[in-house]
Image (cartoon, helix red, strand yellow):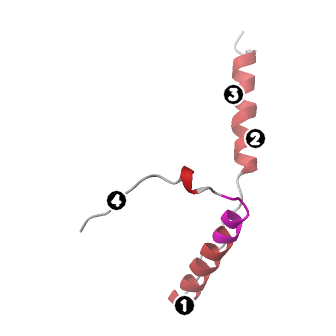
Amino acid sequence: MPGKLTRRQLAAALSSSAALLAQAPLPPLPQNPDEELKAARDQNRQIGEQLARFPLPMSTEPATRFKA
């Protein structure tokens, strides 16, 4: 019967709908470059504040060496 759903199909449908609901809504796009720059700086500041909440020991940083 084509009307029946399997447990796997039901689980896939529920997980995809839950993932879509969990996404944060995007802010409206600014209309001019000054607003866009201010919005980008605000977003960077907010992300920086969120990252500052978690201590990150130096041992977790990747060992990199930049040469020009």
Marks 1/3: CA–CA distance: 43 Å
- Amino acid carrying mark 2 in the image: Ala
Q: Which residue is mark 4?
A: 65
- Amino acid carrying mark 4 in the image: Arg
In the image: residue 61, left or right of residue 29: left
Name which of mark 2 and mark 3 comes first in the sequence.
3
- Decide which of 4, 15 is in the foreground and name it: 15
Query: Which label number is shown at residue 20?
Result: none
The answer to whether residue 50 is seen in the rendering is yes
Q: Taking 39 as reference, is 3 above or below it?
A: above
The residue at 64%/79% (across/down) is 42
Residue 66 image point, x, y percent: 32, 63
Quarter of the rendering containing residue 34: bottom right
Query: Which label number is shown at residue 18?
Result: 2
Marks 1/4: CA–CA distance: 36 Å
Residue 53 image point, x, y percent: 73, 63
Q: Taking 8 as reference, is 56 above or below it?
A: below
- Discs 1, 4 touching: Cβ within 8 Å: no
The residue at 42%/53% (across/down) is 63
Residue 36 image point, x, y percent: 55, 82
Quarter of the rendering containing residue 14: top right
Find the magenta span and give its range. Answer: 48-55
| Circle 3 residues within 10 Å: few <14, some 14–19, many ≥20 | few
Secondary structure mostly seen in magenta is helix
- Discs 2, 3 touching: Cβ within 8 Å: no
